[in-house]
Amino acid sequence: MSTGAKGGVNRRILLKGAAAAAGAVVGAPTIWAQNIKDVKIVHLGQSYSTIQNIAKKANEDLGFTVEMQTVDTATQINRLLTQPQTIDVIDLGNTSMKYVFGRDVVQAIPVKSYKWWDKTVSLFTTGTYQNGKPYTLQGFAPIKSQYYTASDGKQYSRTPTDWLVGVPLYYNADTLGVRTDLVKRPVSSWADLLSSDFKGRAALQDGIFVGVPDAAMALEANGDVTYVDKGNMTKEEIDKTIAKLIEYKKSGQFRSFWTNFDQSVQLMASGEVVIQSMWSPAVTEVRTREIPCIFQPLKEGYRGWYIMMMQMKHLNGLKRDCAMEYMNWFNSGWAGAFISRSGFYNTVLDNVKKHLTPAEYDYWYDGKPASEDIMNPFGRRMEKAGVVRDGGSMWDRMSNIGIWNTLMDEDRYLTRKWSEFIAA
């Protein structure tokens, strides 16, 4: 279904039409149609998803009000658990999915209500790559929390059912950022993060959701620590990990531990750091300053992550129908294309493709050389014509996941030990 961006049918008309059809049965189509404009859906998210340009487009297309509220992770989880009635839909990353389980704050989504499920990439529908091969389950892989066993939403199922935990929105594969002009040898392994060649010029993200899996990939690749599942470490594995990291830190390996996007960009742009944990848009930001920087593919694979949208438990009736309509709209193409221009992938490729130019789709999804300058969602040039996306196509990158972002069973113990490392 089009959202109207390319002359398709306006979703508001369809919703009213569907309401009229339903009303023919229940006898009140006019009340439904009139009430749509009075509905407000509160979407609680973070800066990567609750973007006012998307809210404006949703309000133009849907006929009811979508109010986006942007908060940080801690505030989002706190409201989810203590004030769930103030939220209608919420999007969470895989590092937060365990907070939902068993809390009775969200409700299952019938597969039949989500119209794009048969077009959704296999990472989410079957837990496999494009070629049907299962991906690693180290960390919080998508298939671990994509389905409920039943409509009551009590238990997750690792095999397909008729009940979704949420609607998957977007995802990506992260790796190390490298200053190619300052690193005078090939970088091919996570172990290079710990190489003495880069002593004093390496950095990690300072949080457990990114810093820990990146460090674990490096320690395992370097032969320092072995894990049964580095995405869900035992206390003994955590102790070994932190002890080794403190050893590296005291030897002067790490120049810094960054907290936010801007810090990661500044560390690389200044040349203080030449290899570090990084996010795709940050690498691009460094390059927009005419500074050589790549998002380096590594033989052990990428660190994968995803974002999922869920509907809250208290929703019912017309408001639940509108929330479902909003989730269907979010993956109908326009919003997915908008966010794709930041370097993230949407889960419904056919829909996104209709809202990107051929040059954009070729660059972002197919890994082909940019046939024209590539712009970000706000019209600023991100890449010059001729550039190829680091790592190649979507499936080149997403078919080699070494670990998924995670929240471990021993996360409280890990948080305490990680703090000891940062303070050491």
Image (tube, helix red, strand yellow):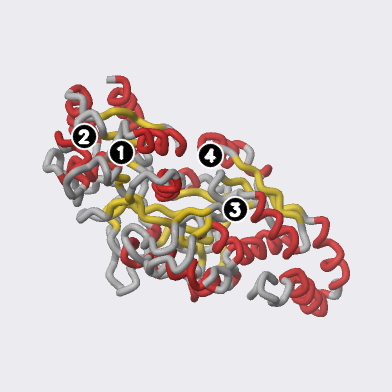
- Judged from the image, the secondary structure of the residue bearing numbered disc 1 is helix
Q: Earlier in the sequence, mark 3 or mark 2?
A: 2
Is residue 188 left or right of 178 when viewed as pictured? left
Residue 149 image point, x, y percent: 45, 63
Q: Which mark is residue 378?
A: 3
Q: Nearer the viewer, residue 217 or 78?
A: 217
Instruction: Give the residue type at disc 4.
Output: Ile
- Judged from the image, the secondary structure of the residue bearing numbered disc 4 is helix
Q: Which residue is mark 2?
A: 241
Instruction: Give the residue type at disc 1.
Output: Val
Gap between marks 3 and 2 measured at Cα: 41 Å
Do the residues bearing badges 1 and 2 touch, measured as CB atoms within 8 Å? yes
Q: Which residue is mark 1?
A: 212
Gap between marks 4 and 2 measured at Cα: 27 Å
Which-is-in-front pick, marks 4 and 2? 2
Say if 17 sits above or below 181 in the image.
below
